[in-house]
Amino acid sequence: MIHVKATIWGEPDVLPFTRIFDYGSADEEIFFSSAAMIQEKLARKMKINANEALVTYCACVVKSIRAGRPESEFKKTLRKSCLPTR
């Protein structure tokens, strides 16, 4: 099961944007397939929107937690590990 609540704060004149990822065990494959398609877009140097960026970020967080990495470790390396090699 995946349950992640992510909030993006932007410019002061824009309201925060919150998205909740709540997938049961049967739907996890859909979530990770979506994340893989977004990674393919990034690898082809295509632009992604805020929702796609959140899916990518949350997929990386979930994978890190399931791999047993401590929070302090994956916070440091999350930015690098979520991006495709260029």
Image (spheres, rainbow, N blue to C red):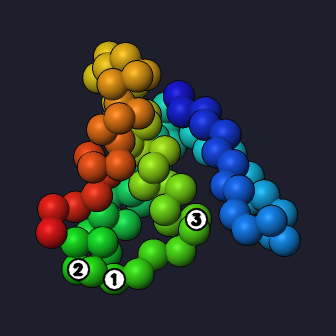
Mark 2–mark 1 Cα distance, whole angstroms, equals: 6 Å
Identify the residue under disc 1.
46
Q: Tag 1: residue type?
A: Met
Instruction: Classify residue 24 as left or right of residue 85.
Output: right
Q: Which element type, helix, strand or loop, lies under badge 2?
A: loop
- For residue 21, say whether it is visible: yes
Q: Is residue 17 above or below residue 14?
A: above
For residue 44, which numbered disc appears in the image?
A: 2
Identify the residue under disc 3.
51
For the residues labelled 2 and 1, say whether their Cβ atoms are less than 8 Å apart: yes
For residue 58, which numbered disc appears in the image?
A: none
Q: Residue at x 27, y 80 (%)?
A: 45
Q: Position of residue 65 (x, y in %)?
A: 40, 24
Q: Position of residue 34 (x, y in %)?
A: 42, 60
Which of marks 3 and 1 precedes in the sequence?
A: 1
- Residues packed near mark 3 inside 10 Å, few (<14), some (14 to 19) or many (20 plus): few
Mark 3–mark 2 Cα distance, whole angstroms, equals: 18 Å
Q: Residue at x 73, y 52 (%)?
A: 18
Instruction: Classify residue 7 as left or right of residue 61.
Output: right
